[in-house]
Amino acid sequence: MWLAAAGAQAQVWKPLKPVEFVVGSGAGGGNDKTARTMQRIWQGAGALQNITVVNKVGGGGAVAYSYVAQHAGDAHYLAVVRKAFLTNHILGRSPFNYTDMTVLGIVGDEVMALAVRADSPIRTLKDLLERLKADPQSVSVSLGSARGSTPHFTYALVAKTAGVDPRKLKVVTFGGAAESVTNLLGGHIDMTAGSVDNMIPHLRSGAVRILGISGAQRSASLPEVPTLKEQGIDVVQGGWLAVMAPNGLSDAQTAYWEGMLERAVAHADWKRLLEADALEPMFLKGQAARDYLKKDYELSRTLLGELGMVK
């Protein structure tokens, strides 16, 4: 029934051998949950039984992408991909770009939040901008584990709206989001920029205050928190989540997987995953998905240049 619903073109092709859904991180992480949720949806509906999730960790995802990319023309390999895929290519950390893969679909978006301790003198976004205009070094901000990341882009774009050179901001990195929040709560930094998901439990406990989120609209997980746009800051910035395959797929192979993804993101289990991880619903396929990535690549290159990270 699912194959018929995927359209006449998709009936021309279906998997002929086991499918590998490759994840560039360890079991239990966000990318792994993405792959395993889709695997469960497809298997539960009887649409695709012979699919396994394969974790290939290393090189910031490059090991996984290299493994998938080397199977050109073979639609039995899928990969979970996030926005760092683009920035790693721009920064020379990875040889792989979105043009080296078949983009099957963008399936979700990770919104960023700017958070301070509950007792911080920075009570509003306006307070933050006034301090940055007076002295860009007066606010120490953690970006998680890497500069040139989505949290960094979000903070830099906010600073730019106040006429502040993003290269002059006082930014620090730690081992990851959890360590950043620990340092925020410990009073070692003034603010952290990171995914909404990491901030929710600390907001609920009253330990932090979120100044704003970077989504186009308020998050269902945080309906009380205003967006940056609502506060007059024209910044919408997120970390997309996509599924890709090797280059060289036929139209029928691509159509098959686009149909499978379309039905997966409509499933209740997928919606529960988005809610649990505070991800925003988003689905683009075909040319729309490729156009979105092209635009995001160009914007990311521009921002990385303004941050002094690329020439």
Image (cartoon, grey):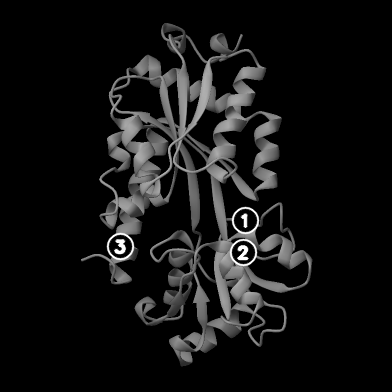
What kind of residue is marked 2? Answer: Thr
| Closest to the observer, 42 or 261 | 42
Residue that carries the numbered disc 2 in the rendered image: 227
Above or below, 261 against 208 in this view is above
Name which of mark 2 and mark 3 comes first in the sequence: 2
Secondary element type, mark 2: loop
Residue that carries the numbered disc 1 in the rendered image: 217
What kind of residue is marked 3? Answer: Thr
Left or right: residue 144 compared with residue 199:
left
What kind of residue is marked 1? Answer: Gln
- How many discs appear? 3
Residue sitting at x 35%, y 49%: 86
Quadrant of residue 113 in the image?
A: bottom right
Residue at the extreme right: 205
Residue that carries the numbered disc 3 in the rendered image: 302
In front: label 1 or label 3: 3
Q: Which mark is residue 16?
A: none
